[in-house]
Amino acid sequence: MRAVVITRPGGPEILEIQERPTPIPRAGEILVRVRASAINRADLLQRQGLYPAPPGAPTDIPGLEYAGEVAAVSPGVTRWKEGDRVFGITGGGAYAEFVTVDAETAARIPDRLDWNEAAAVPEAFITAHDALVVQARLQRGESVLIHAVGSGVGLAGVQIAQAWGATPFGTARTAEKVEKAKGHGLADGIVIGNDVDAFVPACERWTSGKGIDVTLDLVGGDYLGASIRASALRGRIMLVGTVAGRQSTIPTGMVLGKRLTLRGTVLRARSLEEKRAVAAAFAAEVVPLFDAGTLTPTIDSVFDLDQAGVAHERVAGNASFGKVVLRVH
């Protein structure tokens, strides 16, 4: 099979197309003929040698999400059959024509989604749903603040919040991204320059002084302290990313006084059983909303497999809005 290979740690230019053996599904796994994948910042870090693949995943073939059709099933797998359209998250290896995945972590692709649209869904919507609904227990009528609202997860968070009857607000680095996000359901947003705390008074204004109920923080760094200041009593802050920095000074007294919940979350470090539970919740609660047309993926751009380096540059440049998709077949 053809695969994108990290030949050595470095920039996008070190990604090469190579021929590799087609993987063989182990017990409990399925072999997926990948039709499309998508780019995630973790892929960029792995390419740079800063984010090693987890045990069991290919060490030099990136790709954390896939959309494709079942090519083979291992003995004992009865849930899927050859030809079924499936998508999901995996530990790596999805920048290739075939990938093996645990059968219980795959979900059915809604009929209305084509391959590229399906590839733009798993990482963004599974992450947003798990953080906002499963962990933060988002309720109807609550307010949601989403940092990096123009990202794939950010835009998924906007739609998830709306679907659950909440009101989404957001931050971004450009006015263009804020305005585009409004077209996807964002109630209001603010552009963040050098003064991260600028969104705190905006949040007070949006919520008539109450503060934000649930924050989806995809950037970390100084945003965390400002999110605490912007939170409502008993607010919940979900820390998902650290692109703005892995260190932060926070007003601990305010965390105590407001009785806030601050929770970090990552999918990669979870056990297989936990990943299966996340996939099951996604399949039960989110996939039907794509069937109904309530949720829609947001695609920034589509590149062919041999353009993986260019696709990485697109994500690294921070100009993308939504998901950058990698077309495989």
Image (tube, rainbow, N blue to C red):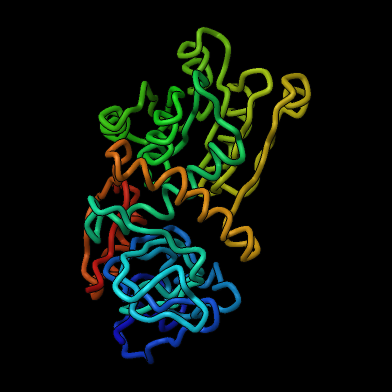
Q: Position of residue 176 (x, y in %)?
A: 26, 33
When the figure is inspected, residue 126 is found, relative to residue 115, above or below; the finding is above
Q: Residue at x 32, y 28 (%)?
A: 185
Q: Position of residue 271 (x, y in %)?
A: 65, 64
When the figure is inspected, residue 293 is found, relative to residue 179, above or below; the finding is below
Q: Residue at x 55, y 25 (%)?
A: 139
Quarter in which the N terminus is drawn: bottom left
Q: Position of residue 138 (x, y in %)?
A: 55, 30
Nearest the eye: 288 or 259? 288
Occupied quadrant, residue 40: bottom left
Q: Residue at x 24, y 67 (%)?
A: 327
When the figure is inspected, residue 44 is found, relative to residue 318, above or below; the finding is below
Number of marks present in the image shown: 0
Nearest the eye: 24 or 7? 24
Q: Residue at x 48, y 43 (%)?
A: 128
Quarter in which the C terminus is drawn: bottom left
Occupied quadrant, residue 51: bottom right
Occupied quadrant, residue 158: top left
Nearest the eye: 59 or 172? 59
Is residue 192 left or right of 309 when viewed as pictured? Answer: right
The extreme top residue here reads 208
Is residue 43 left or right of 309 when viewed as pictured? Answer: right
Q: Position of residue 197 (x, y in %)?
A: 54, 25
